[in-house]
Structures are given as C-alpha cells and as structure tokens.
Amino acid sequence: MAPSSTQALLSVLSGTFVGFSLGLVGGGGSILAVPLLVYVVRIGDPHLAIGTSAVAVAGNAAVNLWHHARGGKVLWGCASVFAVAGILGAFFGSTLGKMVDGQKLLAAFAVLMMVIAGIMVRGHAPTKGSDAHLNSQTSLRLAVIGFIAGCLSGFFGIGGGFLIV
C-alpha cells in the first residue's frame, strides 16, 4: 500500500529530524526513528518500522562516518574490531528480535533507553581518543562490547549509536 501524501510529508520531516540528531550527537537515530515511524507516520507494525528505520539510519550513519573520516576522527583498527563483533552480534540479536511481539519489543526498548540515559547522566572520567591503542586486551574488550552492542542493536532493530556512544 502506498503512503498517503500526509504520511510521506511526515516521513520526510521525521527523517530530517533524525538525520539532524545523528549528525549532531552521532547516535540516537533509531531511538527517534522507530517511535516517529510508529506514532507519527503511523506505520502500524513495529517490526516494519524497525526495518524501515534501519535503512534510513544506515544512510545517515554513512554520511556521518564520511564526515568524521575526512576529519581524521576515526580509529580504524578499533572501529574494525568493534564493527566485526557488532555485525555478528546484530545477526544473532535480530534473529531473536523477530520472535518477540512488536509491542513488547517497543516496551523493552523504552526500558533500555531509560537505562542507557541513566548511565549517560551518571557519566565517567573522559579519556582522549588518541590514548586508545589496539592490543590484545583492547581488542578483546572491543570485541565483547561490540558483540553485546550488536546483539542489543539487532534485537531491538536499532542502529546502536546511542549504545555505542
């Protein structure tokens, strides 16, 4: 079924807002995209909204990556280990996520967002990115955290930027 002109306009406005958020803080695209698609654009099936948001968030993330890479703000070795582990985790998590009722998935996603928000508000001692060196200990830590972030990302059908940041 083709979207109405109102749905198309709401989709464009919602996508613009999501893209701005991703560009500004480097994460949070799916936190915004999935609820906007379900509650504003009125895509009734949460799983359909999750799949739709994945395409939009991936495109936005690619542009964001391009800008950061041009500015020399990517630790490619660390990013590669984290990404490979995250991709494996996302495959596993998405397989499980498709088995869960869409409304229950949205409710669990809301709880996850509150937990992550609490962690972010609590904060931590900042470190310089240039201090990160890829060694066996760092690689293992990146792989474990990347796999967990990937599992959660795949399970909830989100880009994972807010988890990773």
Image (tube, grey):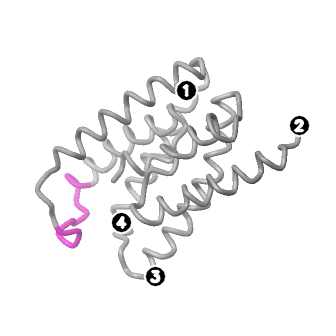
Distance from the alpha carbon under mark 2 to that under mark 3: 40 Å
Q: Give the distance between the C-alpha atoms of the residues marked 4 and 3, in whole angstroms.
A: 16 Å
Q: Please rate how many residues cluster around mark 2, counting C-alpha atoms within 10 Å: few if below 14, some from 14 to 19, many from 20.
A: few
Residue at the disc numbered 3: 70
Q: Amino acid at mark 4?
A: Gly
Q: Does 103 sit above or below residue 152?
A: above
Amino acid type at circle 3 is Arg
Q: Which mark is residue 77?
A: 4
| Secondary structure type for disc 3 | helix
Q: Residue at x 22, y 66 (%)?
A: 133
Q: Which residue is mark 1?
A: 97
Instruction: Say which amino acid is labelled 2.
Output: Met
Of labels 2 and 3, earlier in sequence is: 2
In the picture, the quarter occupied by the N terminus is top right
The foreground one among 74 and 157 is 157
Q: Which residue is mark 2?
A: 1
Determine the residue positioned at 47% across, 23% down.
107
- Residues marked 1 and 3 touching at CB (< 8 Å): no
The kind of secondary structure element at disc 1 is helix
Q: Which residues are magenta?
A: 128-138
